[in-house]
Image: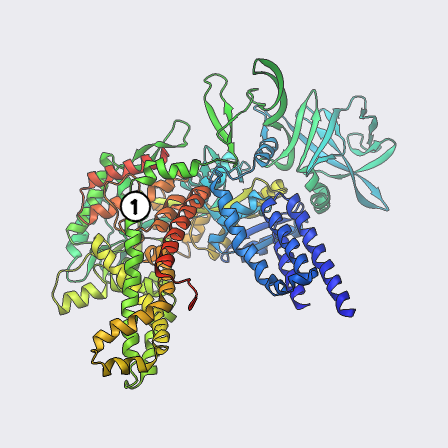
Amino acid sequence: MFKKMILWTSTAIIDAILAWSIMVLMVNGSYGLGVIVILLLVFIDYALINPKGYPFKYMIPALIFMMILTVYPIYFTVQLAFQNYETGYMWTRDQAVNIMLDTIVISPNPKFFDYSIYTLYKDYKPTDNFVMLLKDASGNLYVASSPVKTGNNKYIGNFEMITNGSVSINGIDYSLVRSLKDPSQIIAISVNGQNYNYFYSPSDQTTFPNLKFFNVNYGPELSNTEFINPQFGTLFFTTTYGFNKLVTAKYEYTLSTIPVIENGHNVEKTVLVNTLTQQPVVEHDHAFWNVDPTTGKQTMIIGYYGNAGLSNFSSLLTNKQITSPFLTVFIWTFEWAALSVFFTFSVGLILAIVLNNRNMRLRSIYRTLLIIPWAIPGFISIIIFRVGFFNVSFGIINRIFLGEWLHLAPINWFGDAFWAKVALFLVNTWLGFPYMMVIALGALQSIPDDLYEAASIDGSSRWHSFWTITFPLLMTPLAPLLIASFAYNFNNFNVIYLLTGGNPPIPNSITPAGQTDILLSYTYNLAFGGVAGRDYSLAAAISILIFVIIAAISAVNFKLSGSFKEVNK
Amino acid sequence: MKRLVVLSIVILALLTMSVFAATPGQLLIWADSTRAPILKQLGNEFQAVYGIPVKVVEMNFGDIRTKFITAAAANEGPDIIVGANDWVGEFAADGLLTPITFLSSSQLKQFAPSSLAAFSYGGKLYGLPYGIDVLALFYNKDYVTNPPTTPDQLFTMAKQMTAGGFYGLAYAVYGDPYFSAPFVQGFGGYVFGTTKDGALNPNDIGLDNAGAVAGLNYIVKLFTSGIIPQGEDYNTAANLFTSGKAAMMINGEWEVPAVQQAGINFGVAPIPGGKPFVGVQGFMINSKSPNQIQAMEFMSDYINTPDTMYKIWQADPRIPARYDVAAKAEAVAPWLKGFVEALSNTTPMPNIPQMASVWNAWTNAINLAVSGKESSQAALTTAVQQIKQAISK
């Protein structure tokens, strides 16, 4: 009974947390993750409540991580591949519209207004209620009403010119209260009979002790307020003049309805209008454009991302820039992956066989030493290879091995395609053989000795028994690992990027590509190559393509090698 | 039960990732570890006078750029970031930055023009610069008394001194056109031309004009005459100079501490006939910040003062962007003089997104030419075709 209660309460808590997170995700527009969490919720409830789902309980933690770390990124990548998410198109359409609607421009011939703040005191302390007294260049006085919140961090106030010491805005009466001693001093503004006292002005040093209160309590609101008067214009505090003065300015774009002819009918359509040129903003190609009224020339204002259909995939097939060196890169990627597996496996297997000889002394010491290349972080050894070993003039290989010992001409390691490839294989073999050696050692130890005994009694040579006993018995456990290694090297970005960076370049190619670029480094250059632009969507499309290629190769390989067939079935 | 705890923590963690977002009434700054301490101190002073709290979040320099893009797009960015001018193109294209308009024309005159140009995009200034990176000629005073003033003089001097493992000039030809650009641009080449209103024109590429070819030929000559050995990259060049095996080196002010540490008696002069790129560091305002005016006040009243700029220079010794600060700093670091002189003939690193297409093609062209695989003219023509292809995408 007690156990059951714990089960039910915990289920309820989990459900509550998940339901809440689904709500948060959906409200924030993360529908993809939201759906995944819903699926999780259903599964968890099934596993916890249904007795038949009992075994699944133990899968829940793994499942959560799989959903978050594998399924969601895949979903996200696929979604991205069908959009135009790249530099210049980073917003949703709504965000882009909001950014345009938030843009403030100072009027061509701006008028400036000085201001002072009058605040309502309560118990001798200033409150959040305030009004402003404005003064234009010719000395006219205006009252600005307290800002009213109209939207997310947006406020509106009104202002009116004062005539005969008082004015009325939206039914509220404001009148000036002058000092009796010095009538030029306005010591308060009476708002419907309640006195707001002089508090702060940026031009009056005696009020500076109140600056802090002004900044903390009025600043956030004032920096996002527009003060409106139909006759005198709209006033803002701007990033040009700060809180020093108000300036006439306006929003650069407004929403308005214009009549358009659509399918032969007159319809009213809501559009963004540029308030400087009075031209409606046009929208095409996932972006908003300003139209120059005289020349008709369009300039892009802001782009947004959205569904781009198959355009990323079609540009993979038709864009010459991408396709022209593609074949060279594609073939080399296969050579690279296949030969990397071949070299690492050969070297690893030979060393494993040598180390497997029980008559050898100090075996474990050799074994430990040979694993060291694997234990050193790859990027460190790669950089040491590049700078210390292969440098044309200063590298050890050219200077000492070839130059001083063999008296041969130096090899231009990274300037020549063939030698760059040789260098890559040397380094990758060095990095990869310990892994192959370790797995081969393990597999060798599982081969029973009596097979070799029987073979030697039958007169088989060691060479012959290697090919007929050792090798076939090794391949059964190792083939899937070799395929995995192939797939790993197919995408082995680190070695390529750090050692050659894809160099040497392919001469006369339309797009910059190197002779040692593999698909991944090549697409990295295309999608992110450089300082000022990223094309996430194209990169996503290419990674889907690479996934398809690798999946196909692996499927064929598994099929041919029968690696996934269960033993003795 | 333990599992439930873990589960709820994971989900809560996922949902509360946005703790570093800007909030109205508080300034949030993202800066790296060299700039954060001084900004924290300034932030406290600002709060004491203005009452607005300033929070400085310390991040890796490279992370600021990538995180700012994603965070700002989700309305979760900081109010101010400290970064490099080459971010401006991408940020401004995405509408992530507020133009800097609070500097008066007399205030603008206090800055090195190249630093302002570097932070401009489409005719608007998007950052308040404070420090400049520029290449100049380091010379070892034990070997060179008067630094060369013309490219020919540089060549003859370097040629005379190069012998038996000692080199007249060292610089990183391989890997990065940044170091070759001074010659290419000094001889008349350019990456992008400018339109009438001063904006960069990505359709006007001057990397294969006569000047660019002459510049690359000059570099090739440095190779064929043996002054610069094949395969010399950044590390080897710097090593040659700091170990006293090279008389002159082209490098930036960031290498000064290493040279000083090596005990080299060095001087700095502008690269003869060279027109290097400048990279500029500065402050930028997030266009979606709810505290733009407050951020502007912080920058105009607290950052853009000679005292603050000098303190920032002490924390991060690049070439000060303000002339008055540079003059003050020269008193303690005389080598700054050579760099400040070098600033007079520079070009800002293009910050338009199309620049991304240039680097690879240009690197390849330089590598092909200096290794003798192609003539300078042919290599550059191919490079320009590649760049045009990439831009017209």
Give the percent coordinates (x, y) of residue A114. Answer: 68, 31
Depicted B288 relative to depicted B268: above or below: above
Give the percent coordinates (x, y) of residue B346. Answer: 35, 41
Q: Residue A492: name its quadrant.
A: bottom left
A393, A389: nearer the viewer: A389
B325, B84: nearer the viewer: B84
Please name the residue shown 74% across and 37% down the image. A117
Is A14 placed left or right of A519 in the picture?
right
Is B3 placed left or right of A322 in the picture?
right
Is A497 placed left or right of A244 in the picture?
left
Amino acid of disc 1: Ala
Residue occupying the far left of the picture:
A407
Give the percent coordinates (x, y) of residue A339. Answer: 27, 59
From where the camera sits, is residue B111 visible? no
Give the percent coordinates (x, y) of residue A257. Answer: 63, 20
> In the structure shown, which secondary structural element does the residue marked by tag 1 occupy?
loop
Please name the residue shown 78% across and 32% down the image. A185
Q: Which residue is mark 1?
A: A513
